[in-house]
Image (tube, helix red, strand yellow):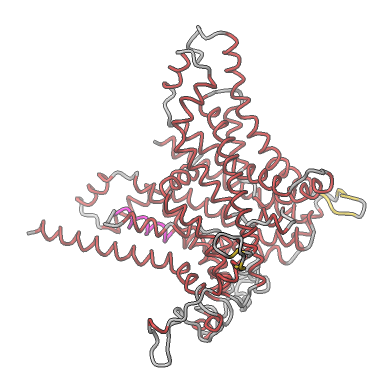
Amino acid sequence: MQKNPSINRRRFEIGKSLPFWLILPTIIVILIVQVYPALYTLWLSFQEREPQGWNYVGFKNFERLFGTGLFPESIGHTAIFLIGYTALTLTLGFFIALMLKRNVPMTGFYVTILFIPWIISDIITGLVFRLMVSPDYGLFSGFLEDRGISVLIDSRPESLIGNFPFPPAPAMIFLILAASWRALPFITLLILAALQTVPSEVMESARIDGANGIQITQHITLPLIMPAMVVALFNLTLGGMNGVGMVFSLTGGGPGTATYVLSYFLYVLGWGQLRFGRAAALALLIAIVNWFLIYLVLRTTRINAKEQ
Amino acid sequence: MSSTNQFSRRKWEERLVGLALLVVCVFAIFPIFTTITISFKEQADITRKPPILFPCDTPEKSFEWSACRWAVEGYQRVFAPKPDENALLGFKLTGNLIRTYIPNTIMYAFASAIGVTLLSSLSGFAFSRYRFKGHDALMTAIYAVTGIPLITNMLALYQMGIVFRKNLPFYDDRIFLIFVYFGFYLPLSVWITKGFFDAIPRELEESALIEGCSPLGAMFRITMPLAIPGLISVFLMTFVNVWNEFIVAYLLVTKNEYKPAMFGLYDFLSQNIINLQVLAAACLIIAAPIIILFLFTRKTFFRAMVEGAVKG
């Protein structure tokens, strides 16, 4: 635009302010729906509800939050959920992507079928899995009850490591399975996209040098797609930490408190017990962890972009 | 000899991989498949112990096609058809899900998808084509916003909803909800659309400018039409996200007649704890339109998702 001096001055000035007007509506919406609420939560985390209004209480909300027994327990549940969920999804996703990359006959058909779970909502996923183990009448309930397991009723077994909720309740394992089922297609797609960028010459020359399939995967494929795996890991962690719908429809946090993850605990604090100050304190902590993860994603992808 | 050997080995490997993928596919659709069979069972088969996959057993045989007891009771209870002489087919569907919740969801999803696509195309274009003060800072800020947990914002948006409901005479849950969806799905969409615009060569636009076209004219006549495939994928992504969204609507909608389908489904869960066939039917009725949409627009979806995931 600036290259051409013959464009008249008035038009040039419109051109200069044009980006501002194009961006303005987006910025306004984001300010109202995202930035203001985030700042409000920051403010709220230092307030307490009094009969006459909100009252500044310093770090009391945080202290009380740490004092609640459910808080460390929810952290433990979240950790177990995230470890199981990311490990399972990444491993399966990697192997399925490797198989899809072979481009055997009917791959297009397989991809279509594989990706259906991905567009099913978390509420429906939770319900669909709930139907399978619903007490007494679920398809697998009989099979599991013969082995003394009832997914939606059994509470957590005695923990082995201090207060850390390990081993998890059957419901938690089932929640991990349901969440992985839904996330797997997306992660497979991410890994597959990265696999497509690995040059086939590298693999061919390794094969000629006598490397077998496992060696190639371990020493060539995996290191080359590591950045994509890291991005997938952070995506999973962010989604797993913030998603709450599946807990709602699959277990409702139960049995007892066996599937209280942090986001569900936040919901219960806020809308179940109406302790919005404490909920805000927890929300703030979750947001900080989220931002740290996003910062790591940005760094990984930036380093990756610079190397290329 | 060795080459034919290798050839047949490759052939076998291919078959093995194909078989493995088939097994994976079976696992992927098994939960949906069981939901379908549950939705067509009758109450007596639902509450049977031990449960069976197909309601097709007879005292003598475990599976007999002619003995299958398929029923549409679950669907009947969701649709709740009532005879009505004025209706086209002689009956009217009176179930809340079909009369209120799904139309609401369609409305929310359409409105949000149109709004998000429109706003993100404008700002994505600006971010892609112009360098201005604070360009990078704004882009990073928009990315950082995606890191705010949804439920964190809900604390404030819930209170805002209460205040608006009390003080604004023209306040409507639906308008506020759609506006909130704009805010939640815009940030990532801006990044995605910027990526799509970056891929369109600017020479086309520059030559239009030299020919005397205004910057706005060049944008709407040259660049936007080229970006339409990308914009459609943003539209579809937002549509599906809003269709599937639960917690925001759950916390912001107070009136029964404004509830979207996912909220309605959650209500079903508490009302039909024993009637699994009703729950299954409701799940399938809500998921079916989205699954069909996905099957027809698969490639478009993948484009937006990959673009959104590898941003940074």
Residue lying farthest to the bottom in this orientation: B60
A211 vs A286, left or right, is: left
Q: Residue B197 appears at what percent x and percent y?
A: 47, 31
Q: Quadrant of residue B226?
A: top left
Whether residue A248 is visible, yes or no, is no
- Note whether B248 is above or below B28 in the view shown: above
Quadrant in which the N terminus of chain B appears: bottom left
Between B118 and A212, the residue placed more toward the observer is: B118
Residue plotted at (34% across, 62% down):
B21
- Note whether B84 is above or below B297 in the view shown: below
Whether residue B264 is visible, yes or no, is yes
- Note whether A222 is above or below A164 in the view shown: above
Between B214 and A224, the residue placed more toward the observer is: B214
Q: Quadrant of residue B114?
A: top right
Q: Residue A298 appears at what percent x and percent y?
A: 53, 41
A121 vs A106, left or right, is: right
Q: Residue A230 appears at what percent x and percent y?
A: 47, 50
Q: How many marks?
A: 0
Residue lying farthest to the left in this orientation: B1
Residue lying farthest to the right in this orientation: A52
Between B34 and A86, the residue placed more toward the observer is: B34
A120 vs B22, left or right, is: right
Q: Give yes or no for residue A112 being in the magenta stretch.
A: no
Q: Which residues are magenta?
A: A91-102
Chief SS of the magenta region: helix
Residue plotted at (15% across, 58% down):
B7
Residue plotted at (42% across, 22% down):
B204
Q: Give yes or no for residue A101 being in the magenta stretch.
A: yes
Between B45 and A285, the residue placed more toward the observer is: B45
Q: Residue A21 appears at what percent x and percent y?
A: 63, 25
